[in-house]
Amino acid sequence: AQKVTQAQTEISVVEKEDVTLDCVYETRDTTYYLFWYKQPPSGELVFLIRRNSFDEQNEISGRYSWNFQKSTSSFNFTITASQVVDSAVYFCALSMNAGNNRKLIWGLGTSLAVNP
Amino acid sequence: NAGVTQTPKFRILKIGQSMTLQCAQDMNHNYMYWYRQDPGMGLKLIYYSVGAGITDKGEVPNGYNVSRSTTEDFPLRLELAAPSQTSVYFCASSQSGREVYYTFGSGTRLTVV
């Protein structure tokens, strides 16, 4: 069975702090994709990153970075020097690439509050 | 603009009423999905479709129906609305092929009273 676990329900930080959001996944497939989405208070889903199972390189995009480790089935997300605008719910999701398994399986999300 | 279009954005239904949530995409994607998001929760899959004429149940299909007569459209039908169906509904699509990306609509906020 496939599953995504985001153990942190809520995180509160002060602006400029670094924060890491954890994501642990389960799948028996060898080919899969991992995603992070941001959901701001306005409610839309904002795509942040996609990573396939064959690419374990870490990625950095501005203040955002992602650490993908297949050995621990984790795909963690770090925000450096957090800002108030980063306040949102962040979702990690898993997808396979096979026919009727090609659907996103979501974690429950981590609500991040960045306080001034 | 290319993408996934959901209508309406907001709706209030009375218990027992019916309605259809519309979803259309203009990217020629084969895969389409309906998710619901309850307050403070992640998204759960209601139904999905791998192509025109083919639909299948997700995790929480009870109380809903779908059809996929064209590649572009994937409407979600609520026949007898219940308070438990109060939620935000997201439609999404994905292309076939090796690369896996998803495009989401902006959501429909439904309240059943």
Image (tube, coloured by chain):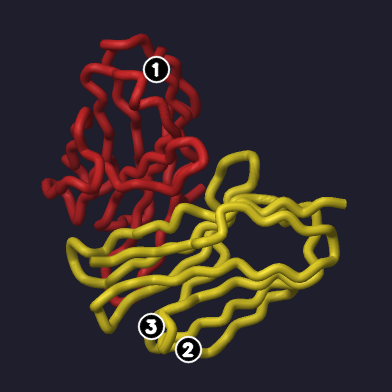
Whole-Å distance between the Cαs marked 2 and 3? 7 Å
For label 1, the residue is B112
Chain letter of mark 2 equals: A
Q: Which chain is yellow?
A: A
Q: Residue at x 43, y 58 (%)?
A: A107
Closer to the camera, A8 or B1? A8
Q: Which chain is red?
A: B
Q: Residue at x 34, y 32 (%)?
A: B22
Q: Is residue B56 above or below residue B23?
A: below
Q: Residue at x 77, y 58 (%)?
A: A13
For label 2, the residue is A56
For label 3, the residue is A53
Closer to the camera, B65 or A66? A66
Specify the quadrant of the image occupied by residue B83. Answer: top left
Residue A38 placed where, x, y %?
A: 58, 56
Q: Is residue A103 above or below residue B58?
A: below
Chain letter of mark 3 equals: A
Residue B5 placed where, x, y %?
A: 43, 40
